[in-house]
Amino acid sequence: MIVNYYGHACFKLKGLNGAVVLDPYSSYVGFDLPNLSADIITVSHDNPAHNNSKDISGTTRRNNPFLIDKPGEYEVLGISVFGVDSSLSAQDTAVKKEKNFIFTTLVDGLRVCHLGGLNHLLDEKIIAEIGLVDILFLPVGNYQSLNEKDAIKVARSLEPNIVIPMIYKLPDHDEKVFADMKPVDDFLKAFEAETQPIDKLNISRSNLPEEMELIVLNQS
């Protein structure tokens, strides 16, 4: 499987059976989404920084991508997607009003979990529903999502083999909208990790690290 990061919370997973785009954004974020195609699109919540499914084109396998924007279990072209409602895990009543869906996608035998705009710790019930995680896309920028300390707690609660940060300040983010968003360096310092960003991740079950490893992806 090949993983590319397109900024904010948007990734593309390219596997043997098909491709999945997660949380495509609109120009609301301050930069434009590249031309992407997919067989499946997942949308964690109804926000222009996450729900721009209309700009994702189909593939030779599917003319129109299959949109997943609600919890449940799905299978398309041999790719399985499992969605849970993370807002049910929030203790704060105000937080519960903001729906956020966590999708775990099974591609090439790897379980890839995208936490969406998660902004609170997860309780044991939600952790159990998510289940095994090989690769975790983790919000770390403290803008309507996790701060660096809580992000580390969430990562440790799910025990993935690989952690890839997302939703952190990039140079082209709209300064008016994302003025309070923190850069990824703040999270790296808290995580006590030194890592050299890479352009894409080419990963299979055979080369998963045994211990939790942090990987930072450059914006494609």
Image (spheres, rainbow, N blue to C red):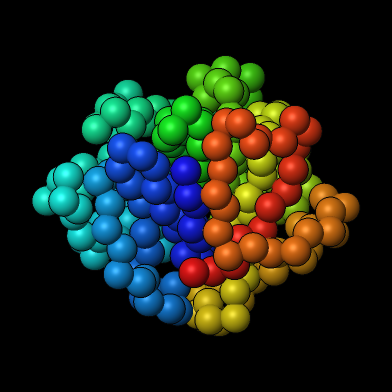
The percent coordinates of residue 43 (x first, y second) are 35, 47
Q: Residue at x 55, y 49 (%)?
A: 202
**Vertical position of residue 177 compared to residue 7: above or below:** below
Q: Is 40 on the left-hand or right-hand side of 89?
A: left
The residue most toward the front is 206
The percent coordinates of residue 188 (x first, y second) are 79, 58
Q: Residue at x 38, y 64 (%)?
A: 25
Q: Residue at x 21, y 42 (%)?
A: 66
Task: Report if residue 95 is visible in the image.
Answer: no
Q: Is 83 on the left-hand or right-hand side of 36?
A: right
**Vertical position of residue 126 compared to residue 96: above or below:** above
Q: Residue at x 59, y 74 (%)?
A: 170
The percent coordinates of residue 198 (x first, y second) are 64, 63
The residue most toward the left is 63
Task: Report if residue 171 is visible in the image.
Answer: yes
The percent coordinates of residue 68 (x first, y second) are 28, 40
